[in-house]
Amino acid sequence: MQTPVVRKSNYCNMNKYLFTLATTFVSLLFSVLFSGCTKDTCKHTHTYTWYEPLYKTSAEVRANIKSNPPTAIKAPGKIVIIGKYIFLNEVDKGIHVIDNTHPSSPVNIAFIDIPGNIDIAVKGNTLYADLYTDLVTLDIANPLNVTKTKIIDGVFPNRSYNYGFVADGSKIIFDWARHDTTLTEDCGQPLWNSQQLWDGRGGVLYSADASGLKNSSGSPAPIGISGSMARFALVNNYLYTVDQSYLKAFDITNSNNPTFSNKVGVDWSVETIYPFKNKLFVGSSNGMFMYDISSSPGNPVKAGEFTHARSCDPVIADDTFAYVTLHSGTTCLGYTNQLDIVKLNDLSNAELAKTYSLTGPQGLSKDDNLLFICDGTDGLKVYNAVDVMNLQLIKQFPGAETYDVIANNKIAIVVAKDGLYQYDYSALSNIHLVSKIDIKN
């Protein structure tokens, strides 16, 4: 029987055929798998939001700093109350003038255009406001005919925009135009998140005077008292301002002609300032710094400090204690939500007396033995503070995301995410809402 012989040429031909077949299959497989990236068939869409700065010349902006027709409130910030009028900051836009003759039905009557405005303060018939980096002085004797009296350039040089945006230095941004755009992009291109170029929150300012704008001959001019979120403060004949790092003093003996006195380095993340008698309490993300202005009001002298874990900290004070709220979820990068009560003793030896856990506290105010706290999404809380070591909750108003509060003359004014509230607390058993000015978002 003859043994079968496999011819070498046929074996090689078979291997060559199988190799060719396998190579073709792999090539087709790779072609299918990656065809979406090599051709225009792999696409994604993404909606971008961007903001275009709208400019005016400095001359145009300054000519329009006056009482103009009222506008809708969209982003309320700092507030001053004097007589029957409320001056309410519209963040980065200007100041609303509100007739509050009847707190149950306030009327928006005028708007003062001041681009870049965040902070305001009042002494008598004079209102002080920031215009981006500049300090503006306004005569408000007639709220329907407000006029500017002086502008000091470059007072707040640290003002800047988010995300590295650089403005045209030869002009002033008076508004932003929003643009929403949907783009189709190749798979290999990165997705970009929508972002805003600028954002701001405010606080509350009020005046202890309720007699009206015009003062009787010989009496001292009423001075606005700052709320816990304010960055402007008035004490006698001085205006004090804080920016990211400095405390600055301006002599306002001549109310319409403020003059710069001095600046003092405080910290690298300063947020708020609160005056009490001859002291200034400056809040930063690292702690509370106390300054004495009794002997030299134009040159504040550091008298003590109280440090805490990194967190934003609005602060108020009385003769014995300082009240500091710490809250998380901000650029301060802290994770603490609590109220710290600090025994002042002497300013150089402040010590923690008591801590209360809260939800997300920010602004706070105290009137006699009542302590008002804006606890974020938990709303406004009113405490009996006769014994600060054992605070008793009297009333809570949930439902509004609150930011700052000023309690004065039995009316508590609250800035919240959805509006400006006024509460009557003349009867502790019946603390109630008397009005709300809605925000047009």
Image (cartoon, rainbow, N blue to C red):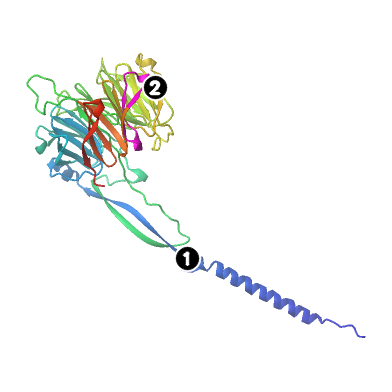
Q: Residue at x 40, y 21 (%)?
A: 354
Residue on which disc 1 sits: 42
On the image, the x and y values in percent for residue 374 come to: 32, 32
On the image, the x and y values in percent for residue 351 come to: 40, 18
Q: Amino acid at mark 1?
A: Cys
Residue on which disc 2 sits: 306
Q: Residue at x 40, y 52 (%)?
A: 193
Q: Amino acid at mark 2?
A: Phe
Q: Nearer the viewer, residue 415 or 1?
A: 415
Q: Nearer the viewer, residue 60 or 369?
A: 369
Q: Residue at x 27, y 44 (%)?
A: 169
Q: Is residue 376 above or below residue 263?
A: below
Placement of the N terminus among the 4 image quadrants: bottom right
Which quadrant would residue 320 be assigned to in this image?
top left
Q: SS class of the residue under badge 1?
A: loop
Q: Residues within 10 Å of mark 2 (few under 14, many from 20)?
A: some
Residue 258 seen in the figure: yes
Which quadrant would residue 343 be assigned to in this image?
top left
Left or right: where 212 falls relative to 405: left
Q: SS class of the residue under badge 2?
A: strand
The range drawn in magenta is 374-393
Which mark is first along the chain, 1 or 2? Answer: 1
